Amino acid sequence: MTKVLAINGSYRDNGVTDQTVEVMIQAVGAKTETILLREHPIAFCLNCRDCTQQPGDTPGECVQQDGMRALIHRIEPADCYLLASPTNFGSATALFKRFMERLIVYAYWPWEMNAPQLRKANAPKKKAVLISSCAAPGILGRWIYGVHKQLDMTAQTIGAHTVDTLFTGLIAKQSQPILTEPVKAKARALAEKLINQSTPRHGKGGVAPSKTR
């Protein structure tokens, strides 16, 4: 049974990002779970690097007792990911970037080393689809803004390879934008691609989508 985890860094209920993630979740035909970062208390990283001193390929233990620890326990068992953030000021939302910084637990970086090593660098790669949106045309926004790179870096950090990206553009012309049918069709196609390229680690087959938060 393939386990799909969506991590959504949007601030807005039922905005373009929420709608896109929901369409993809309904299309995957697997066990799904959604993390809405806006619903979880995540503190800023302290840059103490205590979590990076512990060797091994499993995430280090953060000294902070907040919502991030529970999220790490939900990230680890997933087989593939939907990583989503709209574009704000040319980059991922502050909400998503705060989450990104706390992923330092996925690095091994003892004080005697000049640079960190990703704990999942040699692990079998999971798969991820990246999701974003912007006011500019989608193809332009993907290449001139930093969101795609940030989402891809997140995928690499947690041990996943990006198989494709959905970057929806021209979304700022309505106060309550609604996904067009072509965008929905592409979202469904990418969801199927994600599942097809993901190898289940816990048996075969799928179940009807279920959404938990």
Image (spheres, rainbow, N blue to C red):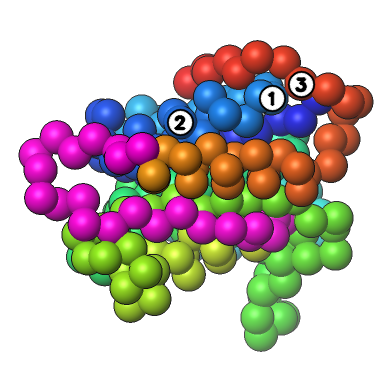
Task: Please check the rendered image and state whether residue 172 is part of the magenta-colored stretch, yes or no.
Answer: yes
174 with respect to 91 (left or right): left
> Of the residues shown, which amino acid type is indicated by label 1?
Ala
Question: Answer yes or no: do the residues labelled 1 and 3 have beta carbons within 8 Å?
Answer: yes
**Alpha carbon of mark 2 to alpha carbon of mark 1: how far?**
13 Å
Where residue 149 sits: x, y (%)?
48, 70
Where residue 164 sits: x, y (%)?
58, 58
Nearest to N terminus: mark 3 or mark 2: 2
Where residue 204 sits: x, y (%)?
88, 26
Give the numbered dot on residue 30: 1
Write down the quadrant of residue 184 in the picture: top left
Residue matched to label 3 = 206
Q: Residues within 10 Å of mark 1 (few under 14, many from 20)?
A: some
**Alpha carbon of mark 1 to alpha carbon of mark 3: how far?**
5 Å
Q: Is residue 52 above or below residue 76?
A: below
- Asked if one can make out residue 106 in the rendered structure from this viewpoint, the answer is no
Where residue 31 sits: x, y (%)?
68, 22
State the residue at coordinates (71%, 30%): 3
Residue matched to label 2 = 23
State the residue at coordinates (66%, 24%): 29
Nearest to N terminus: mark 1 or mark 3: 1
Q: Give the residue furthest to the bottom.
A: 114
SS for dot 2: helix
State the residue at coordinates (35%, 58%): 92
13 with respect to 196 (left or right): left
**Alpha carbon of mark 3 to alpha carbon of mark 2: how far?**
17 Å
Task: Please check the rendered image and state whether residue 40 is part of the magenta-colored stretch, yes or no.
Answer: no
Question: Which segment is the magenta one?
Answer: 159-181
